[in-house]
Amino acid sequence: MPDPALALSIQGLSKSFDRPVIRDLHLQVRAGEFYALLGPNGAGKTTILRMVAGLLQPETGSISVFGTDTRKDPIAAKSIIAWVSDEPMVYDRLTPYEYLEFVAGLWRIEARQAQTRATELIEWLGLGPHAHERCGGFSKGMLQKVALAGALVHEPRLIILDEPLTGLDAGSARQVKQVLLDKVRQGVTVIMTTHILEVAERMAERIGVINHGRLIAEGTLGELRTRVGRETTLEEIFLDLVAQKEMDAGHGVDAAA
Amino acid sequence: MSFPPATMPWFAAHEARLMWRDGIAMLTGGYPARRVALLAFVVIVAVLMHLLANAIVSPWLDRGLVPDKPTLVLITGSGFLFWTVMLSQALESVTRAYYSRSDLELILSSPASSRAVFAVRTGITAATTLLLACLLASPVVDILVVHQGPRWLMAYLVLAALAAFSTALAVLITVGLFGIAGPRRTRLVAQIIAAIVGAGFVIGIQAIAILHFGNMSSRLALFSDPQFVAAMPELDHWLWLPAKAALGDWRALTVVVLAGALALVTTIAFAASSFGRNAIAAAGVGHRRAAARHRSVNFRPRSQKQQLRIKEWRLLARDPWLLSQTLMQIFYLVPPALYLWISYGQSAGTYVVVIPVLVMATGQLSGGLSWLAISGEDAHDLVVTAPVPPAAVLQAKIEAVAAVVLVVLAPIIALMMLASVELAAKTAVFAALSSGSATAIQLWFRVPMRRAMFRRRQVASRVSTIAEALSSIFWAGAAVLVAGDQFWIAPLPGTLALVTLAVAYWLSPKGRRD
């Protein structure tokens, strides 16, 4: 029975393309939590998040978001989720305002309310001077901000971000991080993949490490330190865990958490 | 064989390899096993085209073929029609050489010579223009070779010279536009010129035929008109050199081929120096920001489907490549519209000639727009993750396309109704069938791609491209038979259209899943 106190509950999830990518994954994220998903390239992080967002169908297992099974009631699940990918999903030939009006319409947000939120978000993200320009000539950072505004305009309860800081300059990255922390303070759940371990270390309440489609470790930074047995940085912990997993795999030992 | 890096032969080998792989991928859809099926299909189409060419050319040959003035006028006139299509294609290819940013930024940022890149890409434009011309003209030329001997093989050399001329002119037009209109408007103006050149001359000839002869059954009627032939220059004029060359005159052939090669080489030498500068200026266009005309913020209450429709219309209206892709199709509706305008009130029977053009053009227009709306979704993830049932998204997109097609077609149907409500109704029904079929095919074969990939949409599936064209043709055939009250034979093309749809569905990813 899905637990509505959990923002995300994944049970026995598997997915294959040419080869198994996700294998019997179990993962739970609490409501209002900032959760970082780490893993080497090709570990399966993006595949997991795309399945949660409804962009991929799992082969086995179940996903529930705030108690709603994403396969049984995808519309209800989608209405409370926002998905932000590393490639901003923005139309070149719409202005930020037109884009936000479109997104708000898709999420059935009342027009007046959507307009107020869009105006606030545009100002908050520093897009005001460009709000009536088409997105075609925007920098990667500006496009990512427009995409983020689109993700926030319908006030989701769960925000899923795949490498949202890739290619952003320091100022834009800081602004995006601040927006996400503010949202978590307001009770929104954020799940994010990142290769910038410092970001995960500073922002995430709990961290999950994925390798070869399996969750090999999970916990707070302190718990992960305890697991590797020394007081060190997340980078060292991550490299230790992944190297240990590779060694175990080489000896045929399944050390999945 | 390997060439020294960054030299012209090295670039040419690089481009040739990319083109070859691209072409094979486009034709086989990424499945090498399909090559045999593809070869069989090409052979069947080639045989059919040659049979058709034989049926067209044989009566003409029976009357005798001598290089007299009427023959030269006819060959030159039809050759010019053909050349305008080559010029249109070359102009579009050359514009893309400047505006395509796929690997140009990499090459221009390298120490390699931009002149060498330009020379190679212009040469490839000429080669691809020639290839297309050969594909279209080869059935006729081959039949002439069979009937009249190998001297007609020289026609292929004439085609090569025409490809060189068209590419040279296309380069000059593009460079001129960069100077006059600037990098921001050159692409748009070049597209309009390409569309007008490609369709405009054909339409002009048809318009003259309609106004002068009262029918649009033959585009070549003007070239056979004694008055027109008499007004043309005498036999020793340079204008007839390509026609004489095609008819086997060695001296004329030498002049034509040399002139073509000289024009291309001179143009490349002239324009190569500005290529890097213009390409960089063109690349900068994307970084400029177009401001919206209306700066007010006024979100209107709309349903999800309305939002999707409005978004599609906005994107269609602002699409920079859509113009050239659809303008030609819309231009082809001009002759029937003109024909309706000058002859409305006459016997309804004469409208039979208009109907297939309308039905085919509607199918093609719907196919292009449907691809843009259904497959060309830049924010695919956004739409999929939105709480909107997928069926509702597709329905809204189809409605958006249908509305655009309706806006284009409605005035012509309305004009038709003034003369014959019955024929207008029949045309509307078959145009709807053609449009619906093209849309359905795009729906079954949908593959999410960037809208910028519009021109390369055939890469996703050549089956869908062929099925779309065949269904339009068969519905046009059925329409003309129904309009001519030949009800006993009309079910045949109608059935063929339905069979085409069934086969397309069966071959489509959706059909295979179901």
Image: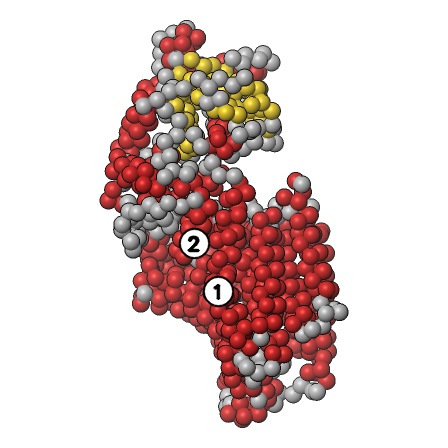
Taking B478 as reference, is B257 left or right? left
Report which residue position mark 1 lands on: B408
Q: How busy is the neighbourhood of tag 1: few (under 14 within 10 Å), some, or many (20 plus)? A: some
What's the residue type where badge 2 is placed?
A: Trp
Q: Is residue B156 visible?
A: no
Q: Quadrant of residue A169?
A: top left
Element type where label 1 sits in the image: helix
Q: CA distance from mark 1 to mark 2?
A: 14 Å
Viewed as shown, does residue B463 lie left or right of B200?
right
| Chain identifier of the residue bearing label 1 in the image | B
Task: Determine whether the residue tagged by mark 2 lies in a helix, strand or loop.
Answer: helix
| As drawn, B313 above or below A64 | below
Name the side, left or right, on which B506 lies relative to B289.
right
Q: In the rendering, which numbered label is found on residue B495?
A: none
Q: Disc 1 residue type? A: Val
Mark 2, residue position: B313
Chain under numbered label 2? B
Q: Dividing the image into 4 quarters, which one contains the C terminus of chain B?
A: top right
Residue A21 location in percent, x, y? 56, 26
Relative horizontal placement of residue A184, taking residue B455 as reference (left or right): left
Pointer 1 and pointer 2 on the same chain: yes
Residue drawn at 55 percent across, 63 percent down: B362
Which of the colour schemes (rainbow, by chain, secondary structure, one colour) is used?
secondary structure
